[in-house]
């Protein structure tokens, strides 16, 4: 059991601010904790460290923003769950397949599924006109029951007739393969960082402006037919990306 009182004792005479001392001591303790370990409440941290509520809250807030802690409304603050690590530089793989391979339990909540105009980004990725109708599917992906990723897929309507009548809570790649004979064989994925807006924060259960990983994936079939354009917003505390550096096709190898 963690001796929080001993490990969080601060030095008021030090030149380093108290919130900084508390944050770094918490960081050190977190490294020794299992994922999903509940940390003491703010009022207890105030006692252990001899600090004000504002100081305790600032230290915790910094670590939440870094993805080391997760604040769960009505429950408390926990060390981050074990992150999943999809591999980049290999064949396109879906969320369901990746999680199953890692022994995790993926589930999906369908939020939207309809036809809409492609717009500029999807049109460029799919090789269609901006005003042309495409299939849009928005899904919330959960990992062991915890919201992990918001996924927005765009598909050419002529390739997937009747797809809106199908069950879209399973693997989209499996559905494309088994019903339509379409398999993503190659593609491109770009990764960036964004801050959660109100809707993303609510859906992913993170604070407003929390750091998220944003990816945009375009895939095509073996014959070169554009198959999908998918945007993902993933919680930084639940997702990391692994890159195989010995792949000569990986962009990192050329830098």
Image (cartoon, helix red, strand yellow):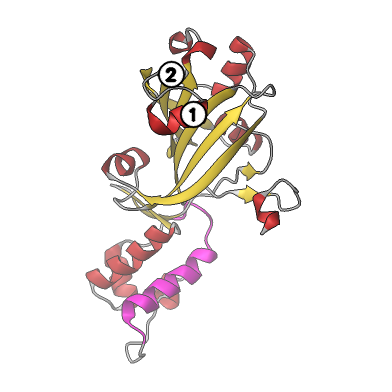
Q: Which residue is mark 1?
A: 107
Secondary structure mainly formed by the magenta segment: helix
Q: Position of residue 36 (x, y in %)?
A: 47, 51
Task: Provide residue 131's location: percent of width, then percent of height.
Answer: 36, 21
Secondary structure state at the residue bearing disc 2: strand
* Residue identifier under label 2: 135
Decide if residue 43 is in sight here. yes
39 or 176: nearer the eye?
176
The quadrant of the rendering that contains the C terminus is bottom right
For this rendering, which residue is in front, 89 or 52? 89
Q: Residue at x 49, y 42 (%)?
A: 215
Q: CA distance from mark 2 to mark 1?
A: 21 Å
Mark 1 secondary-structure assignment: strand
Q: Give the mark nearer the N terminus: 2 vs 1.
A: 1
Question: Residue visible at 43% across and 34% down?
Answer: 121
- Membership of 54 in magenta stretch: no
Compared across the picture, whether 58 is left or right of 141 comes to left
Return the x and y of residue 13 as percentages of the image width and height. 33, 92
Q: Looking at the image, is 80 positioned above or below residue 111?
A: below
Above or below, 182 against 246 in this view is above
């Amino acid at each position: 059991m963690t001796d929080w009182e001993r490990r969080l004792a601060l030095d008021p005479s030090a030149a380093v601010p108290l919130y900084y001392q508390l944050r770094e001591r918490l960081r050190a303790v977190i490294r020794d904790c299992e994922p999903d370990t509940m940390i003491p409440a703010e009022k207890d941290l105030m006692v252990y460290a001899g600090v004000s509520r504002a100081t305790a809250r600032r230290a915790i807030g910094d670590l939440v923003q870094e993805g080391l802690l997760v604040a769960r409304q009505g429950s408390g603050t926990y060390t981050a769950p074990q992150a999943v690590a999809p591999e980049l530089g290999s064949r396109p793989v879906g969320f369901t397949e990746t999680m199953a391979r890692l022994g995790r339990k993926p589930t999906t909540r369908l939020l939207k599924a309809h036809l809409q105009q492609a717009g500029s980004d999807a049109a460029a990725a799919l090789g269609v006109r901006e005003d042309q109708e495409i299939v849009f599917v928005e899904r919330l992906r959960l990992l062991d029951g915890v919201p992990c990723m918001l996924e927005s897929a765009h598909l050419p309507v002529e390739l997937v007739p009747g797809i809106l009548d199908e069950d879209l809570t399973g693997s989209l790649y499996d559905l494309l393969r088994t019903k339509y004979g379409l398999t993503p064989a190659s593609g491109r994925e770009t990764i960036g960082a964004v801050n959660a807006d109100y809707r993303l924060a609510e859906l992913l259960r993170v604070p407003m402006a929390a750091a998220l990983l944003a990816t945009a994936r375009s895939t095509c079939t073996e014959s070169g037919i554009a198959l999908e354009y998918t945007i993902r917003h993933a919680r930084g505390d639940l997702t990391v990306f692994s890159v195989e550096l010995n792949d000569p096709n990986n962009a990192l190898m050329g830098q």
